[in-house]
């Protein structure tokens, strides 16, 4: 398989980081947090840690009001023996959020974080200010922002196997996730839903790999819906960038704050790449109208839109010269369990003849 040149530096950087971590592992320590452990709260261990250490937080326990900066680098912070709950509970660090990550090469695994609020309404469970960050198996919910990152063109962000829900101050400027102008974002195997007026995912990264996720929201009034019941974009890539949207389930609810489901380049296609690949996704629009793919007129490169199911009303793409291949429209969609959001189409002749599997790296116009 020919791999996109844009993706190669990410792979090389990850390998280099892994080698550095291995080299320093001999002197690394494991710090234990929890009842009866050396440290009673995560921030005490974070303050005591040295570069390269691992912090293990005992799960099935709530740590309330424990907020701090993570200033060391090459740290791994993970929940063990269950998932620990980090509840900001009215506290914050630096008027920014719960954990303010200023160190580099930080990995956070298996934590639940909630309750981040600050005076200006822009608090984040995880405020990213360092270089390179990985999040796995986390549940981030009911914060003003789930993740908030500023501009750092040297930083690679990886988020996988995690859930984000009910984040947002309700002003349209706060989101489940906001990734600033990073080098790359890899967002895979996640569930992002019910952002409060804001977006379920917003990324200004120069390279985006958004693969095998679910984006959806609960109808107003049903258990689990936001207070407003009005998320905005499911995916927003406002500055374009080389971006792959592959194998996702993307649903827009009947009540929303914006009829566009995915937006690309609408704030200015200022990233170096303007190539968008939308392949093997299932889109469902429960609104009465709208646009599945809003692609700014400032984007000059034709998008590749291949092997997708577009269910419900709306325009597939605003880009007139987009390359559309082997897609299927379903005005009256049939899914295995629509109410339960199991949005796999029922097997029928239309789906069976939907076309060959697309290679996301080489399909369409020969771009790589």
Image: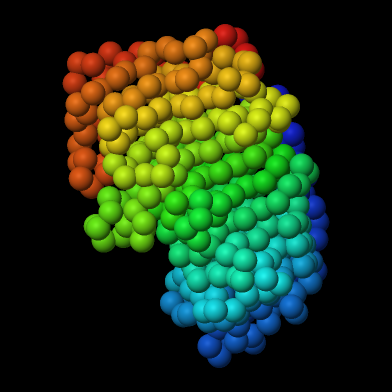
Left or right: residue 190 compared with residue 271: left
Can residue 193 be seen from the camera position used here? no
Instruction: Report the residue at 27% width, 50% height from top.
Output: 219
Instruction: Report the residue at 46% width, 62% height from top.
Output: 141
Relative image position of residue 111 (x, y in whole percent): 52, 66
**Outermost residue toward the bottom?**
36
Instruction: Report the residue at 58% width, 31% height from top.
Output: 266
Instruction: Report the residue at 63% width, 16% height from top.
Output: 300
282 relative to 105, above or below: above
Relative image position of residue 353 (x, y in whole percent): 28, 13
Rendered image quadrant of residue 126: bottom right
Nearer the observer, 115 or 101: 115
Nearer the observer, 346 or 36: 346
Instruction: Classify the position of the N terminus by image quarter.
Output: top right
Left or right: residue 226 compared with residue 21: left
Rendered image quadrant of residue 228: bottom left
Relative image position of residue 44 (x, y in whole percent): 68, 82
Can residue 339 be seen from the camera position used here? yes
107 relative to 96, above or below: above
């Amino acid at each position: 398989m020919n791999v996109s040149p844009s993706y190669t530096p990410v792979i090389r950087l990850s390998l280099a980081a892994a080698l550095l971590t291995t080299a320093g592992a001999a002197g690394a320590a494991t710090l234990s947090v929890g009842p009866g452990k050396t440290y009673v709260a995560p921030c005490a261990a974070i303050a005591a840690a040295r570069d390269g250490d691992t912090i293990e937080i005992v799960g099935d326990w709530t740590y309330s009001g424990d907020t701090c900066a993570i200033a060391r680098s090459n740290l791994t912070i993970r929940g063990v023996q269950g998932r620990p709950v980090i509840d900001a509970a009215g506290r914050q660090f630096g008027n920014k959020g719960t954990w303010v990550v200023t160190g580099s090469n930080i990995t956070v695994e298996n934590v639940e974080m909630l309750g981040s609020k600050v005076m200006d309404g822009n608090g984040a469970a995880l405020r990213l200010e360092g270089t390179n960050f990985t999040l796995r198996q986390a549940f981030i919910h009911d914060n003003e922002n789930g993740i908030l990152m500023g501009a750092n063109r040297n930083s690679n962000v990886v988020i996988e196997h995690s859930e984000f829900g009910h984040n947002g101050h309700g002003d349209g400027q706060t989101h489940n996730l906001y990734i600033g102008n990073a080098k790359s974002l890899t967002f895979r195997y996640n569930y992002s839903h019910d952002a409060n007026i804001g977006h379920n995912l917003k990324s200004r990264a120069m390279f985006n790999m958004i693969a095998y996720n679910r984006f959806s929201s609960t109808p107003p009034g049903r258990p689990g819906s936001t207070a407003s019941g009005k998320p905005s974009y499911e995916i927003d890539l406002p500055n374009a960038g080389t971006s792959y949207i592959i194998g996702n389930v993307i649903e827009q609810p009947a009540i929303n704050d914006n009829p566009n489901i995915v937006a690309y380049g609408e704030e200015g296609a200022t990233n170096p790449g303007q190539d968008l690949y939308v392949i093997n996704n299932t889109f469902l629009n429960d609104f009465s109208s709208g646009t599945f793919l809003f692609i700014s007129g400032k984007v000059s490169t034709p998008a590749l839109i291949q092997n997708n199911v577009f269910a419900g009303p709306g325009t597939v793409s605003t880009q007139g010269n987009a390359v559309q291949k082997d897609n299927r429209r379903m005005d009256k969609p049939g899914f295995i369990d629509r109410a339960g959001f199991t949005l796999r189409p029922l097997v029928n002749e239309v789906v069976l003849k939907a076309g060959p599997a697309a290679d996301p790296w080489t399909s369409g116009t020969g771009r790589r």
